[in-house]
Amino acid sequence: MAVINDDMRSIVASCGLGYAATVTPEGAPNLSPKGSLAVWDDDHLYFADIASPQTIENLRHNPGIEVNAVDIVKRRGYRFRGTGEVVSDGPVFDKAAQVLHETHGPQYPCNHAVLIHVEEVRPLLSPAYMFNETPVAEDDLAAVWRGKLGLAGDGGLARRAAAYEKVLSAILNFRSVEEVRDVFSREVTQEAAEGFADALNQVRDRGQPDEYAMADAIEHVIILRSAENDVTPEQLERLFNDPDHHEMPSEEITSRVVAVWERTAG
Ligand SMILES: Cc1cc2nc3c(=O)[nH]c(=O)nc-3n(C[C@H](O)[C@H](O)[C@H](O)COP(=O)(O)O)c2cc1C
């Protein structure tokens, strides 16, 4: 029975790195990354043993293996469990060696290939998909993480603005992201524009680039508006830092927001 579907194929291709867990002869866990992880067919994965002596030894004693493949931008993936067969010739070995040498060069040794007979597949989901009141769409989360990981193109600024809207909807208890966007465009932007000259003077005093000024002006308004809604610094900090809220701004921005909060509300 086929266990590997198209979505699993796409995640294995996009994850860039799978983590293979085996058990040592002494019974200890052994986890190591395999960039060469790929799908063989509807029931099998494989990877090249380039520098994985312990994994190979483990499989010879106990073929049990679990491989995790997670797309770190989409924040989801799969756990593949089954048995690992160590092969030194035949079509799987030939393919592993061919791909390795084509993609990395002939200097890389392909000592063996490991063919994983997949018996069970379970999905892996970031808590961001599970614990937010408003369901998080994969595209939104991916956009935020592309920005965080420095993979965003020109749309990065717009995506960061979208992330802020989500944060604000939680902080300010607005009913929807749309309402936040509305308030943001009508009021916050106006106030931020009014505070822009002061913010510009401040960033210049601190020796920072001029482009920090608009972000500072907007953050300042956010903080003042948060204060109007009885949000404590602790709540604010928790919201910005909560690892489950992946749409939150970066730690650097968080610490700046909290610092400004403390100066203005503190
Ligand atoms: C990003 C990355 C990709 C790697 N890809 C592979 C791989 O495809 N095959 C391999 O044998 N080793 C790979 N390695 C190296 C092994 O993970 C590493 O040598 C590890 O210590 C092997 O441990 P083990 O013997 O317990 O498997 C990779 C390491 C990193 C950091």
Image: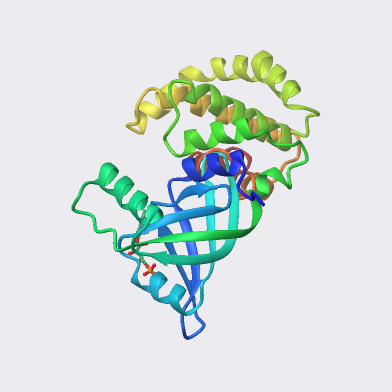
Query: What residue is drawn where x is 43% and y is 24%?
Result: 153
Viewer-side residue, 5 vs 32: 5
User: Which residue is drawn at the image coordinates 27% and 42% (left, top)?
Assistant: 102
Q: Residue at coordinates 57% horizontally, 20% vertically from top-left?
A: 192
Q: Position of residue 30 (x, y in %)?
A: 46, 72
Q: Position of residue 129 (x, y in %)?
A: 69, 43
Query: Considering the image in quadrants, where does the C terminus appear?
Result: top right
Frontmost residue, 65 versus 19: 65
Tell me where residue 223 appears, x and y as whole percent: 62, 34
Q: For residue 138, what is the image quadrant? A: top right
**Farthest bottom residue?**
26
Residue 89 vs residue 121, the one in the foreground: 89
Q: Is residue 121 left or right of residue 147?
A: right
Tell me residue 180's x, y (percent): 71, 24
Q: Which of the four quarters of the rendered structure image does ligand 1 lie in?
A: bottom left
Would residue 204 appear left or right of 253 to someone viewing this image? left
Colour scheme of the rendered structure: rainbow
Picture layout, residue 52 above or below residue 169: below
The answer to whether 101 appears left or right of 11 in the picture is left
Q: Give the mark count.
A: 0
Specify the farthest residue to the left.
107
Is the residue 227 above or below the residue 198 in the image?
below
Tell me the residue at 48%/62% (across/down). Answer: 20
